[in-house]
Amino acid sequence: MTAIRPEVLVLDVNETLSEMESLRSRFEGAGLPGESLDTWFAATLRDGFALTAAGSYGAFRTIGADVLRSMLAGAGLAPDEATIGGVLFGFGELRVHPDVASGLRRIHDLGVRLVTLTNGAASMSERMFAEAGVLPLLEHRLDVESPGRWKPHPAAYQYAAEVCGVEVERMALVAVHPWDIDGARRAGLQGFYLDRRATPYPEAFLAPDLVVPDLLALAKALEAR
Protein backbone atom coordinates (compact mmCIF):
# COMPACT_ATOMS: atom_id res chain seq x y z
CA MET A 1 0.00 0.00 0.00
CA THR A 2 1.09 3.60 -0.56
CA ALA A 3 1.58 5.56 2.64
CA ILE A 4 1.30 9.33 2.95
CA ARG A 5 3.94 10.86 5.18
CA PRO A 6 2.36 11.27 8.63
CA GLU A 7 2.69 14.39 10.77
CA VAL A 8 3.27 12.29 13.89
CA LEU A 9 4.99 8.94 14.14
CA VAL A 10 3.87 6.88 17.14
CA LEU A 11 6.56 4.40 18.12
CA ASP A 12 5.96 1.22 20.05
CA VAL A 13 8.79 0.53 22.51
CA ASN A 14 9.18 -3.09 23.64
CA GLU A 15 10.93 -5.06 20.88
CA THR A 16 10.23 -2.32 18.33
CA LEU A 17 12.86 0.05 19.73
CA SER A 18 14.34 -2.01 22.56
CA GLU A 19 16.47 -5.10 22.12
CA MET A 20 15.08 -7.56 24.68
CA GLU A 21 17.39 -10.54 24.20
CA SER A 22 19.52 -9.47 27.15
CA LEU A 23 16.61 -10.31 29.46
CA ARG A 24 17.12 -14.03 28.81
CA SER A 25 20.07 -14.12 31.18
CA ARG A 26 17.88 -12.71 33.95
CA PHE A 27 15.37 -15.52 33.48
CA GLU A 28 18.22 -17.99 33.58
CA GLY A 29 19.51 -16.35 36.74
CA ALA A 30 16.08 -16.91 38.28
CA GLY A 31 16.30 -20.62 37.47
CA LEU A 32 14.16 -20.61 34.33
CA PRO A 33 15.32 -21.41 30.78
CA GLY A 34 16.17 -18.41 28.62
CA GLU A 35 13.29 -19.13 26.24
CA SER A 36 10.92 -18.46 29.15
CA LEU A 37 11.23 -14.79 28.20
CA ASP A 38 9.03 -15.40 25.15
CA THR A 39 6.40 -17.28 27.16
CA TRP A 40 6.42 -14.66 29.89
CA PHE A 41 6.10 -11.71 27.49
CA ALA A 42 3.25 -13.36 25.56
CA ALA A 43 1.41 -14.23 28.79
CA THR A 44 1.85 -10.71 30.14
CA LEU A 45 0.36 -9.27 26.96
CA ARG A 46 -2.45 -11.84 27.11
CA ASP A 47 -3.46 -10.85 30.63
CA GLY A 48 -3.19 -7.13 29.86
CA PHE A 49 -5.38 -7.61 26.80
CA ALA A 50 -7.86 -9.68 28.85
CA LEU A 51 -8.27 -6.94 31.44
CA THR A 52 -8.74 -4.37 28.68
CA ALA A 53 -11.37 -6.55 27.00
CA ALA A 54 -13.17 -6.78 30.33
CA GLY A 55 -13.16 -2.98 30.67
CA SER A 56 -10.47 -2.93 33.34
CA TYR A 57 -6.77 -2.09 33.58
CA GLY A 58 -3.62 -3.46 35.17
CA ALA A 59 -0.12 -2.00 35.16
CA PHE A 60 2.46 -3.83 33.05
CA ARG A 61 4.75 -4.41 36.00
CA THR A 62 1.94 -5.77 38.19
CA ILE A 63 0.78 -8.18 35.50
CA GLY A 64 4.33 -9.14 34.56
CA ALA A 65 5.15 -9.91 38.19
CA ASP A 66 2.03 -12.05 38.53
CA VAL A 67 2.93 -14.06 35.42
CA LEU A 68 6.53 -14.52 36.55
CA ARG A 69 5.38 -15.59 40.00
CA SER A 70 3.20 -18.31 38.44
CA MET A 71 6.02 -19.44 36.13
CA LEU A 72 8.46 -19.77 39.02
CA ALA A 73 5.97 -21.70 41.14
CA GLY A 74 5.15 -23.97 38.19
CA ALA A 75 8.84 -24.76 37.82
CA GLY A 76 9.11 -25.67 41.50
CA LEU A 77 11.04 -22.51 42.34
CA ALA A 78 10.39 -20.08 45.16
CA PRO A 79 8.56 -17.05 43.71
CA ASP A 80 10.24 -14.59 46.07
CA GLU A 81 9.92 -10.88 45.43
CA ALA A 82 13.67 -10.32 45.17
CA THR A 83 13.92 -12.75 42.27
CA ILE A 84 10.91 -11.24 40.52
CA GLY A 85 12.21 -7.72 41.03
CA GLY A 86 15.61 -8.71 39.69
CA VAL A 87 14.13 -10.02 36.45
CA LEU A 88 11.88 -7.01 35.90
CA PHE A 89 14.69 -4.61 36.78
CA GLY A 90 16.28 -5.70 33.53
CA PHE A 91 13.77 -3.62 31.57
CA GLY A 92 15.47 -0.51 32.85
CA GLU A 93 18.82 -1.69 31.47
CA LEU A 94 17.77 -2.53 27.91
CA ARG A 95 19.43 -0.94 24.89
CA VAL A 96 17.95 0.16 21.60
CA HIS A 97 18.40 -1.74 18.34
CA PRO A 98 21.42 -0.57 16.28
CA ASP A 99 19.25 1.25 13.72
CA VAL A 100 17.20 3.26 16.20
CA ALA A 101 19.41 6.29 16.81
CA SER A 102 20.32 6.97 13.18
CA GLY A 103 16.86 6.06 11.90
CA LEU A 104 15.03 8.36 14.31
CA ARG A 105 17.40 11.23 13.56
CA ARG A 106 16.74 10.92 9.84
CA ILE A 107 12.98 10.78 10.39
CA HIS A 108 13.11 13.73 12.79
CA ASP A 109 15.08 15.72 10.21
CA LEU A 110 12.16 15.27 7.81
CA GLY A 111 10.00 17.29 10.18
CA VAL A 112 8.03 14.28 11.42
CA ARG A 113 7.10 14.53 15.09
CA LEU A 114 8.13 11.50 17.18
CA VAL A 115 6.33 10.09 20.22
CA THR A 116 6.43 6.74 21.95
CA LEU A 117 3.40 4.80 23.18
CA THR A 118 3.93 1.69 25.26
CA ASN A 119 1.85 -0.75 27.27
CA GLY A 120 4.65 -0.63 29.85
CA ALA A 121 5.67 2.36 31.93
CA ALA A 122 7.10 5.26 29.94
CA SER A 123 9.64 5.91 32.69
CA MET A 124 11.11 2.44 32.20
CA SER A 125 12.75 3.40 28.89
CA GLU A 126 14.10 6.85 29.81
CA ARG A 127 17.62 5.61 30.53
CA MET A 128 17.68 3.60 27.31
CA PHE A 129 16.70 6.59 25.17
CA ALA A 130 19.09 8.90 26.98
CA GLU A 131 22.03 6.54 26.45
CA ALA A 132 21.14 6.26 22.75
CA GLY A 133 21.03 10.05 22.44
CA VAL A 134 17.45 10.10 21.12
CA LEU A 135 15.62 11.39 24.18
CA PRO A 136 15.57 15.00 22.84
CA LEU A 137 13.99 13.77 19.60
CA LEU A 138 10.92 12.40 21.39
CA GLU A 139 8.22 15.03 21.80
CA HIS A 140 6.21 12.82 24.17
CA ARG A 141 6.82 9.48 25.85
CA LEU A 142 3.42 8.04 26.57
CA ASP A 143 2.03 4.93 28.19
CA VAL A 144 -1.47 3.55 28.61
CA GLU A 145 -2.00 4.39 32.28
CA SER A 146 -3.98 7.57 31.51
CA PRO A 147 -6.46 6.01 29.05
CA GLY A 148 -6.62 2.89 31.23
CA ARG A 149 -6.69 0.62 28.19
CA TRP A 150 -3.84 -1.34 26.68
CA LYS A 151 -3.08 -1.19 23.00
CA PRO A 152 -4.66 -2.36 20.71
CA HIS A 153 -7.76 -0.74 22.26
CA PRO A 154 -8.65 2.39 20.24
CA ALA A 155 -8.64 4.52 23.40
CA ALA A 156 -4.86 4.14 23.65
CA TYR A 157 -4.22 5.52 20.16
CA GLN A 158 -6.84 8.24 20.59
CA TYR A 159 -5.08 9.30 23.78
CA ALA A 160 -1.83 9.76 21.84
CA ALA A 161 -3.67 11.85 19.24
CA GLU A 162 -5.20 14.05 21.94
CA VAL A 163 -1.83 14.64 23.61
CA CYS A 164 -0.27 15.54 20.25
CA GLY A 165 -3.22 17.72 19.22
CA VAL A 166 -3.76 16.03 15.86
CA GLU A 167 -6.37 13.84 14.23
CA VAL A 168 -5.58 10.12 14.24
CA GLU A 169 -5.56 10.19 10.42
CA ARG A 170 -2.42 12.35 10.56
CA MET A 171 -0.55 9.78 12.62
CA ALA A 172 1.14 6.46 11.91
CA LEU A 173 2.11 3.71 14.32
CA VAL A 174 5.44 1.88 13.98
CA ALA A 175 5.61 -1.55 15.61
CA VAL A 176 7.00 -5.05 15.24
CA HIS A 177 3.73 -6.50 16.54
CA PRO A 178 0.98 -7.18 13.97
CA TRP A 179 -1.71 -6.89 16.67
CA ASP A 180 -0.52 -3.33 17.32
CA ILE A 181 -0.55 -2.47 13.61
CA ASP A 182 -4.07 -3.88 13.29
CA GLY A 183 -5.30 -1.95 16.32
CA ALA A 184 -3.83 1.31 15.08
CA ARG A 185 -5.32 0.88 11.63
CA ARG A 186 -8.77 0.16 13.06
CA ALA A 187 -8.41 3.32 15.18
CA GLY A 188 -7.74 5.39 12.05
CA LEU A 189 -3.93 5.62 12.04
CA GLN A 190 -1.61 4.34 9.36
CA GLY A 191 0.26 1.20 10.35
CA PHE A 192 3.96 0.73 9.55
CA TYR A 193 5.13 -2.83 10.16
CA LEU A 194 8.75 -3.01 11.29
CA ASP A 195 9.52 -6.54 10.16
CA ARG A 196 12.80 -7.05 12.03
CA ARG A 197 12.67 -10.86 11.88
CA ALA A 198 11.25 -11.40 8.37
CA THR A 199 8.05 -12.75 9.91
CA PRO A 200 4.99 -13.28 7.69
CA TYR A 201 2.23 -10.83 8.52
CA PRO A 202 -0.98 -12.59 9.69
CA GLU A 203 -3.83 -12.59 7.17
CA ALA A 204 -6.39 -12.20 9.95
CA PHE A 205 -5.22 -8.64 10.69
CA LEU A 206 -5.67 -5.50 8.63
CA ALA A 207 -2.68 -5.19 6.34
CA PRO A 208 0.00 -2.60 7.13
CA ASP A 209 0.35 0.52 5.01
CA LEU A 210 4.09 -0.01 4.82
CA VAL A 211 6.49 -2.88 5.56
CA VAL A 212 10.16 -2.13 6.27
CA PRO A 213 12.96 -4.12 7.94
CA ASP A 214 14.25 -1.31 10.17
CA LEU A 215 14.00 2.40 10.95
CA LEU A 216 16.63 3.40 8.41
CA ALA A 217 14.52 1.81 5.68
CA LEU A 218 11.47 3.59 7.10
CA ALA A 219 13.30 6.92 6.95
CA LYS A 220 14.20 6.29 3.33
CA ALA A 221 10.60 5.40 2.51
CA LEU A 222 9.29 8.53 4.20
CA GLU A 223 11.84 10.69 2.37
CA ALA A 224 10.19 9.62 -0.87
CA ARG A 225 6.77 10.87 0.25
Image: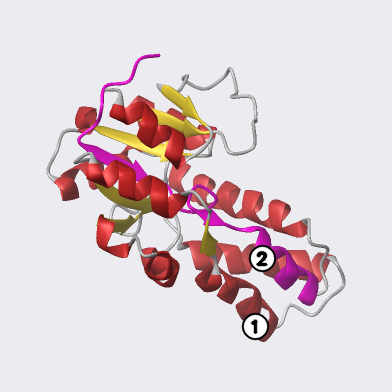
Query: Residue 27 sits in which quadrant?
Result: bottom right
Task: Please check the rendered image and state whether residue 107 is part of the magenta-colored stretch, yes or no.
Answer: no
Which quadrant holds the N terminus?
top left
Q: Amino acid at mark 1?
A: Glu
Looking at the rendered image, the disc whose residue lies closer to the viewer, 1 or 2, is 2
Q: Nearer the viewer, residue 79 or 120?
A: 120
Could you say which disc has been placed on residue 81 in the image?
A: 1
Magenta stretch bounds: 1-30
**Secondary structure under badge 1?**
helix
At horizontal 59% and vertical 72% (from top left) the residue drawn is: 90
At horizontal 67% and vertical 58% (from top left) the residue drawn is: 21
Query: Residue 76 sits in which quadrant?
Result: bottom right
Q: Nearer the viewer, residue 76 or 100?
A: 100
On the image, the x and y values in percent for residue 213 come to: 54, 34
Q: Amino acid at mark 2?
A: Leu
Q: In the displayed image of the protein, which residue is found farthest to the bottom? A: 82
- Answer whether residue 30 is visible to the viewer in this image: no
Task: Please check the rendered image and state whether residue 9 is part of the magenta-colored stretch, yes or no.
Answer: yes
Q: Nearer the viewer, residue 43 or 1?
A: 1
Q: Compared with residue 3, is residue 105 higher up or lower down, i.e. above or below?
A: below
The residue beneath circle 2 is: 23
Q: Compared with residue 169, is residue 174 higher up or lower down, i.e. above or below?
A: below
At horizontal 41% and vertical 54% (from top left) the residue drawn is: 101
Q: Is residue 101 left or right of residue 7?
A: right
The number of numbered badges drawn on the structure is: 2
